[in-house]
Amino acid sequence: MKKRILTGDRPTGKLHIGHYFGSLRNRVKYQKEYDTFIIIADVQALTDNFKTPRKVRENVKEVAIDNLAVGIDPQRSTIFIQSLIPEIAELTIFYSNLVTIARLERNPTVKDEFKQKKEVFQDKITYGFLGYPVSQAADITVFDADLVPVGDDQLPQVEQTQEIVGKFNRIYGKVLVKPEAAIDEFPRVRGLDGRSKMSKSLDNAIYLGDEAEEIQAKVAKALTDKNKIKIDDKGNPDDCTVFYYHQIFEAENLAQIRKQCQTGVRGCVNCKKELANNIIQRLAPIREKRKYYEKNPKVVEDILRNGTQRAKKVAQETLARVKKSMFLDYFK
């Protein structure tokens, strides 16, 4: 049997090139080698979007479409909706007995995300948000995932899962698979504004479905070397977000771009136009495939229904093992 992968996205908006380079393109590669489960984590999305559930619901299909548009094959990968797998919620309850409040409060990812979302919580963290790493552990283990591809900001979540698995197996016997993390080549893609992470909430992203005009307008506003003001000023490519994207999109003339910038031959306006054209060409096949699924919502719905049915079957088998080990298999 193939080893399994669990990966996925929160349905809080369409996916962007940060998701593509940080995760999506590797999913396409992994699905050839692994039994791949892709979770659309609507329950997790509600931990900080509980006041806007309609937004979460509307983006479930958008996230599914983005995955399909980049090349996820529903014959090889199982795409499913988290809230339709109640076994995950049940496992979350069992695992919550194995984690202290203090441990959750030390989780650096939770702390960082809480700081970013103070407007939502008004300095009062909720039980659901503090405990979502426990739910993530249930996401991962209910499918016996061997590997979890993550960005470096999500590494603490996998480590938390490993702790939960270790404690569970010590108490109840070797029941759960201990997952390993796989860090992608671009675990964090910088935002257009130069911030360390591209984000929907920070409005510094290029989305996979953006039209050419949108991409050109966004790249035109991208942050460049603040010390390069005039065309003939010598620039520092390593302090320029535009050059950073040239590297990600594998510009053929990368060495030349660097040299021209450093010697004051290359202007920022033309440099941005060249980058925008490269991005437009690279995303064109994804954009076209995305339009197909947008015009055929029934196809997407069937993929989600079939994937969720398969995911539920696997989850039921895992939960049965867990309950047996915990002496909760009544009336068998």
Image (cartoon, rainbow, N blue to C red):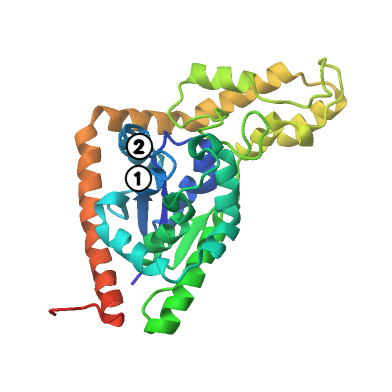
At x 60% / y 47%, what residue is drawn? 112
Please name the residue that numbered disc 1 is placed on. 42
4 lies above or below 262: below
- Do the residues bearing badges 1 and 2 touch, measured as CB atoms within 8 Å? yes
Q: What residue type is disc 1 on?
A: Asp
Residue 169's x, y, as percent?
42, 80
**Image quadrant occupied by the C terminus:** bottom left
Residue at image coords 62%, 26%: 275
Q: Amino acid at mark 2?
A: Val
- Residue on which disc 2 sits: 56
Secondary structure type for disc 2: helix
Could one spot residue 149 in this view of the protein?
A: yes
Choose between 3 and 263: the one closer to the eye: 3
Residue at image location 31% in from the left, 55% down from the top: 76
Q: Nearer the viewer, residue 5 or 329?
A: 329
SS at mark 1 in the image: helix
Q: Nearer the viewer, residue 161 or 144?
A: 161
- The residue shown at (54%, 54%) is 154
Can see residue 143?
Answer: no
Circle 1 packing at 10 Å, graded few (<14), some (14-19), many (20+), is many
Percent position (x, y) of residue 78?
A: 30, 54
Residue 236, position as x, y percentages in the image: 82, 31
In what quadrant of the picture does the N terminus appear?
bottom left
Compare marks 1 and 2 and give the one earlier in the sequence.
1
Q: Residues within 10 Å of mark 2 (few under 14, many from 20)?
A: many
Say above or below: 42 vs 78.
above
